[in-house]
Amino acid sequence: MRDLTKGNPMKQILLFMMPILIGQILQLTYSLVDTRVVGSVLGDTALAAVGATTSLSTLVIGFLQGLTNGFAVIVARFFGAGDEQGLRRSVAAASVLSLGVSLLLTVLTTLFLPQILGVLHVGNDIYALSYEYIIVIFAGMTISMLYNLCAALLRAIGDSVTPLIFLAISVVLNIFGDLFCICVLDMGVRGAAVATVVAQLFATVLCLLFIYKRYEILHIQKESFGFSKELAHNLLSCGLSMGFMGCLVNIGTVALQTGINTLGNDIIVAHTAARKLTELFMLLFGVVGTTMATYSGQNFGAGRIDRVKEGVKAALTIVFIWCGVVLLCSYTIAPQLIRLVTGTKSETVVSAAWSYLKFDTLLYWVTAIIVVLRNTMQGIGDHVTPIVSSSIECIGKIILVNLLVEPFGYWGIIVSEPITWCFMVIPLIVQYVRNPLLKKVSQSMH
């Protein structure tokens, strides 16, 4: 366990985020290998089928991940305050709510999947492949939710190393599972999805066993299930806020995907490659965001709001340095990375994906500010401003994809995201400067 309310903020943030960063790299490595295996073994059509539904699975799984991270913020506050009884009650309530939400979403997404794929404009030539891939991912949604909840709870009490170890095991299983299901069992794109679900199940079991053996503070007791309106309200307000925050962002991405799916398989493959590399380039942003949610949550619970401001400065320093590294990569080695990820020989695919990366990375610093401030505000209890900012992104993408794709083609997609970033950062900066909690601390220090 790591207490983030003491010590140098920059050092604490770096130490806490490093295991998360390594874990995200491992997860992304699997994702890239998955893309390469599907593209190389099954061909561009199969890769387009998977890519056409990627934004959909990211939307749903991202909501569940945001939900569990939000629940963990409340747990982190109890941990920071030293309230062990409150912590256990919050873990019990979070577990019940997580299971209920994931089961409901599993039923809804599998029941209405044909209609959802229709809304996404998935082409007839890839519809069957897309369906057989995404139906397995959705069927295993509760397993993914349980793993994310366990990992989030461990991070809430300062243990970011253990989730990394189990994730590493899961990633290795995932890669070998991909090769076995696709190359040996000849399961096609369904094999990639099955390998993912089985690997997550293994990681979930390991997490639960470790918590049972190592962290008594996270053990749920019978009295932990006592209903409290205030606790339920706090969990749901934070969890749903972070869940919908990611959901709104991903709804906008789904809107972009509906436009992309009308531009042909070459552009679908190009965008799939560009998004995979975008995940790599933006990986540090998400890691710092997750860290700041826990860091600010613990310090808020301990009444150390002054450390929150110091943490924000440290986090922005880290992500701005990373933005410079990413921009350099985008303008030098991006074509080689695109070919490596997809295995494609199409220059049309490479050229379109490279155009996307060269333009969007110019404004990554805006995204960096968004992620740091959005997660910090969630940690200190402001659940409204991040939703407002994410709503701007969602609405902006929907409007722009309808306005720009028809006249400008893929360039309409490329410019849509940076334009929305510039608008959505405004309420976050304004509210951070005006935040009454931060002002109160600042005034008390003078």
Image: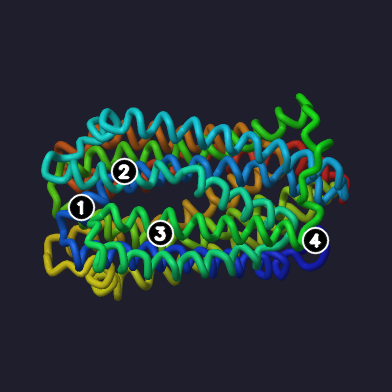
Look at the numbered disc 4 and give the secondary structure of its residue: loop
Kind of residue at badge 3: Glu
- Of labels 2 and 3, earlier in sequence is 3
Q: Amino acid at mark 1?
A: Ala
For residue 303, side relative to residue 366 (left or right):
right
What number is the disc on residue 82? Answer: none
Pointer 3 or 4: first along the chain: 4
Q: Which residue is situated farthest in the top direction here?
A: 229
Q: Position of residue 56 (x, y in %)?
A: 35, 41
Q: Cα distance, mark 2 to mark 4? A: 41 Å
- Residue underneath mark 2: 416
- For label 1, count other residues whose C-alpha is less than 10 Å away and answer few (under 14), some (14-19) or many (20+): many
Asked if marks 1 and 3 touch (Cβ < 8 Å), the reply is: no
- CB contact under 8 Å: marks 2 and 3: no
| Residue at the disc numbered 1 | 48
Q: Are marks 2 and 4 in contact (CB under 8 Å)?
A: no
Q: Are marks 1 and 2 in contact (CB under 8 Å)?
A: no
Spatial distance from mark 3 to mark 4, Cα to Cα? 30 Å
x, y percent for residue 167: 53, 64
Distance from the alpha carbon under mark 2 to that under mark 3: 17 Å
Q: Amino acid at mark 2?
A: Ser
332 lies above or below 104: below
| Foreground residue among 23 and 291 | 23
What label sits on residue 279 in the rendered view? Answer: 3
